[in-house]
Image: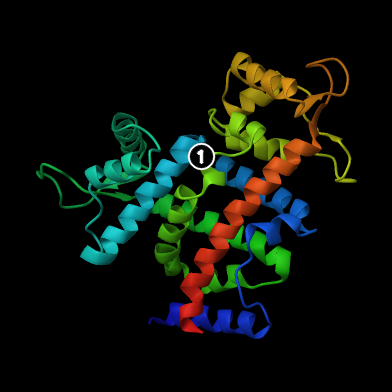
Amino acid sequence: MGAPALAASNVWRVVMAGGRQMALNADDIFLNPALEARVRGQAWALLLLNAADPRMGSLFATQQRWLMAHAAVAQFFRDVAVAGAGTGVLTARVLDLVEHHQIASRNTAAAFIKEMLKYGIVRHVAGSEGKRHRPVEPAPAALESLYQWHLLHLATLDGLDGGSRSAALAAGPEVVRRMQPMIADGLLGSHMVREPEPTFKLFTWVNEGGVLMDRLIVGCEEGDASVDRIATDVTSVSALAQRLKLSRTQLGRKLAEAESMGSLGWVGARGKSRLWVSKGFRREYHKAQAVKLAIIDAAFEACFTTHR
């Protein structure tokens, strides 16, 4: 074990000594009174990550692309763990995994990988020129974004129970290589992730849908979370569409669908006043975050408790 991993395990021993013995499950997280404030902060951090690299963010802005990306990175880490650094992963193995989990067709997955190659999110492994099947690997910027994604979700979990997960990962960032495949397995195997509740599902399969939901949550007025409707700071569909790089027509159609479900609406005239979101929609968002965070926490514990 290298020094960073040892340091990380020492931090985790301190956490364990503090009495936290098990990863939080989704119900623990969903019922935690601090969840609303913590996921609001998490949503804000995710928006900042997206703003820092909109190209990378847009590639993973639908549920299908997000799951394909997790599957691809998991296969990369597993292949490299066996074959060694610099070997990468063959595209065919990623396509097999995507097809096995029924995330997308092979053609859709192949087009996704080509798009990631085009924009430098992944790259061909150095020295593979001339090979019929060239392995690929995530670019350094993609790996850094992946690390930041793990770190901010662990920070959310820390905010729920006073843990030190994010400090443990910061002390041993290479642990992401073991955590991420476990997280990918959890996401791909979760019915709640694959089949979310109606409003969440409506948005998560549209381009920038995840960013849209984060933006609505960040924009909610602070106050009594138990009220049926909470107003947001969103007043212009056109401005929101421009920020999300969506057509106003496309976004307006999705908002209208959500409105017909009672999940959101307008405080006054439609499209000319502030948008409100329902308690039901916020509940769906919080439940989806709880499921994701529980999967992440289980992977974290599996990686760090081996050094207890």
At 68% from the left and 58% from the top, the residue drawn is: 27
Circle 1: residue type = Gly
Give the structural element (helix, strand or loop) at label 1. helix
Q: Is residue 132 visible?
A: yes
* Residue 205: image location, x then y, percent: 53, 31
Q: Say if 109 sits above or below 254 in the image.
A: below
Write the residue at 62% across / 23% down.
242
Of residue 257 and residue 276, the one placed in the foreground of this image is 257
| Spot occupied by residue 196 in the image (x, y as percentages of width and height) | 59, 39
Q: How far from the left and from the top, in percent, is residue 65?
A: 44, 37
Image position of 128 with respect to 56: above or below: below
Residue 132 appears at what percent x and percent y?
Answer: 10, 41
Task: Determine the residue positioned at 15% across, 49% down.
Answer: 128
Decide if residue 215 is on the left or right side of residue 95: right
Report whether 110 appears left or right of 62: left
Q: Specify few, some or many for label 1: CA neighbours under 10 Å numbering under 14, 14-19, or 20 or more.
A: many
**Which residue is rendered at x = 50% and y = 37% of the image?**
63
Tell me the residue that label 1 is attached to.
Answer: 57
- Vertical placement of residue 148 versus 95, above or below: below
Q: Quadrant of the N terminus?
A: bottom left
- Whether residue 139 is visible to the viewer of this picture, yes or no, is no
Nearest to the observer: residue 188 or residue 136: 188
